[in-house]
Amino acid sequence: MTAPTIAPDRRRFLGATATAFAALAASGCMTRGAPAPTRAAAVGDGFTDYGALVPDPAGLLDLPQGFSYRVISSLGDAMDDGGTVPDRADGMGCFDIGNGEIALVRNHELQPQHDAGGAIAKGFGKRNGVVVPGGTTNIVLDAETLAVKRQFRSLGGTIRNCSGGVTPWGTWLTCEEAPTGPGQRYGDGLERNHGWVFEVPASARGLVDAVPLTAMGRFNHEAAAVDPATGIVYMTEDRDDGVLYRFVPKVPGRLTAGGRLQAMVIDGLADTRNWLESGSTAAMAVGQSYPVRWVDLDTPEAPADDLRQRAAAKGAALIARGEGLHMGFGRGGSEVFACSTNGGAKQLGQIFKLTPGLAGAPDMVELFFESESEAQFNYGDNLAVAPNGHLIVCEDQYTDVVDNHIRGITPDGIAYTFARLKAQTELAGGCFSPDGRVLFVNAYSPTATLAITGPWAA
């Protein structure tokens, strides 16, 4: 798919922006401001949860009464291109591709030593002459029945495709969590530097050309989210001393044309992590808004993997393990929600809300939620905005005794448990179908992609 060129004059730009918002809704990137079908899930109307979890007879995923799931794709399933479904399913986006079909574009966080599910014909990078196994698969479903119509490898030759984000023009941004390359740590045998963002059309019919979007930076990428009003792309970084980035494209909707990479500065607040030392108090209070500004970063290709340090030297605020990122839409316009996996006084996780400024006003950021107990959420990772405005957060906690959950958070900041995975692996890739009736989610390893349906607004 070719990204549209957005015309520079105001009238045509506004028309393209309206189209982009419609495309965003159609992509499954549901808006926070969407009305709930019934009063029970409405903001401030006493909603607390969907009820107690019912044990799953199959021993995979416990859900509330009235909800059910089906497994639509699993590790080792035969694909239409002759390969099999690879392991380590991570970030994922859902798109309406027309003709009664929806497509899931699914990341696979594979490293060079992992099984690709069969030989990959082409891709970005090689190790010792063999295309490296990371990348994406596309699953095309009947929009009504959710029957799998075809699935295939759509991107190859990348490493550790962790998360990403949907675009309003019908593509998936898949991000490498792997700033490595020849002569660098873990780079033995690699022929090219890695740590980039790549773009995969939801309408792909097979392997696409793997083109790194180098102007968007080389770092330990996690997720991305596009503001359809401006085309600006926000990006998280999965490191304890990471920062929040944004990419301002030269041509909105055409990322290959280049642009400026920037980092978020909160004047007077250099650290959002709230990691407390003895006797100290939290630096960033829940619910308090702060104006932000953005500083330009040169040499985004960062051969030394030092973007975050250079950003911090310019005053960028530190964020602990930035992971899930999702675009919503509230009364004031666009809202970007970002998850910090181990931020907060209890180091259980935080969620930030960034509101881009309108009419020359500054962007604002607030600490929307900070987990105070494992019962709220424990190491939140991928997140999505549900049709009723709730956040849906996938947990990524690895211990011998902890089950990972899907947690919900209401617009009022009330956390509840929606699902419990009865397997020692993470949940990832949560995203809604364009009509809002299905939540798709991945069990990471062994790969299992699930479709969850039920009384979402009840």
Image (cartoon, rainbow, N blue to C red):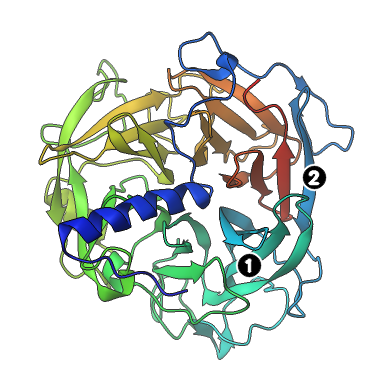
Q: Amino acid at mark 2?
A: Arg
Residue 220 shown left or right of residue 190 in the figure: left
Residue 176 shown left or right of residue 77 in the figure: left
Residue located at (24% from left, 21% from top): 288
Residue 327 shown left or right of residue 107 in the figure: left
Residues tagged 1 and 2 counted as in contact (Cβ below 8 A) = no
Q: Quadrant of residue 356?
A: top left
Q: Nearer the viewer, residue 186 or 226?
A: 226
Farthest residue, direction bottom: 129
| In this view, 49 is above or below 362 | above
Q: Residue 174: x, y in percent?
A: 47, 63
Report whether residue 113 is seen.
Answer: no
Residue located at (12% from left, 40% from top): 359
| In this view, 322 is above or below 160 | above
Q: Nearer the viewer, residue 50 or 29?
A: 29
Q: Residue 306: x, y in percent?
A: 25, 62
Q: Amino acid at mark 1?
A: Thr
Q: Nearer the viewer, residue 171 or 38?
A: 38
Q: Residue 58: x, y in percent?
A: 88, 38
Q: Tag 1's secondary structure?
A: strand
Q: Tag 2's secondary structure?
A: strand
Q: Residue 346: x, y in percent?
A: 43, 24
Image quadrant where one finds the C terminus: top right
Q: Which mark is residue 137?
A: 1
Q: Quadrant of residue 9?
A: bottom left
Q: How many marks?
A: 2
